[in-house]
Amino acid sequence: MNPITYSLVTPMQPASRAVSTVLRLGLGVVWLVAGLLKVNDPDGMVRSVRAFRILPDALVQPIAYGVPFLEIALGMLLVVGLAVRLSAVVSAVMFAVYIAAIASAATRGLRIDCGCFSSGGDLTADAPTHYTSELIRDSLLLAAAGLLAWRPSGYLAVDRLLDQPVNDLSGSTADGCEVEEGTVDDRR
């Protein structure tokens, strides 16, 4: 068995589960804070999305209005530990999009605030940009999301409860079929 297959099928060690839990909770809090800071300022979000000058005008408002709610939903899912792998993959895609948008703005010489944790928008001529720190931050968050997508099983997660077999003392199997006492269920 090659090392990649081995690492994907072997059970996680306690330290690995702890790291997964910290990553999941950290990303969840980041998404919740980012979304909650933006959700009450839809006009600021429209300014922020428009400032990047990437999307056609018809898409600016739907994206600006939807992003905070997506961020809040991802945050809640990650904090409770439900659909962790899917949430981590969506997080990674979003961070990759954010990185591309910020890099695009920097390359094109735009002077904007990304709006990651605020309403964002165009900066004044004397205000400094923070592209480097924003790119580093989002790259680290992308790496964390990637690790979490690879190893989503941590502690304190609803997913772990859903993955456990149900102890059914009624004599039925996992597929609901009855098994007579004294017989062997050889369907597995």
Image (cartoon, rainbow, N blue to C red):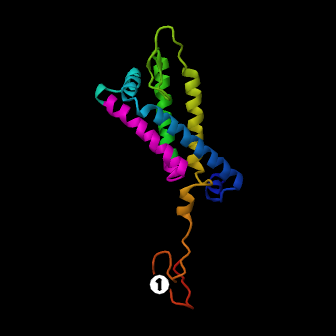
Q: Quadrant of residue 146?
A: top right
Indicate the secondary structure of the residue bearing disc 1: loop
The residue closer to the viewer here, 5 or 63, is 63
Horizontal placement of 113 versus 21: left or right?
Answer: left
Q: Where is residue 152 in the image (x, y as percent from the top left)?
A: 58, 51
Which x, y percent locates residue 137? 58, 30
Q: Position of residue 63 (x, y in %)?
A: 36, 33
Per the rendered image, the range of residues in magenta is 59-86
Name the residue furthest left: 58
For residue 176, what is the image quadrant?
bottom left
**Which amino acid type is marked by label 1?**
Glu
Residue 101 painted magenta = no
In the rendered image, the quadrant that contains the N terminus is: bottom right
Which SS does the magenta portion mostly show? helix
Horizontal side of residue 64 vs 99, given as left or right: left
What is the quadrant of the C terminus in the image? bottom right
Q: Which residue is drawn at 44% across and 25% down?
A: 119
Examine the structure image and report whether residue 82 is included in the region drawn in magenta. Answer: yes
Q: Position of residue 86 (x, y in %)?
A: 49, 49
Among all residues in the image, which is located at the extreme bottom? 182
* Residue found 54% across the figure and 71% down from its top: 166
What residue is disc 1 on? 178
Along the line of sight, which residue is nearer the eye, 91 or 187? 91
- Residue farthest top in this picture: 126
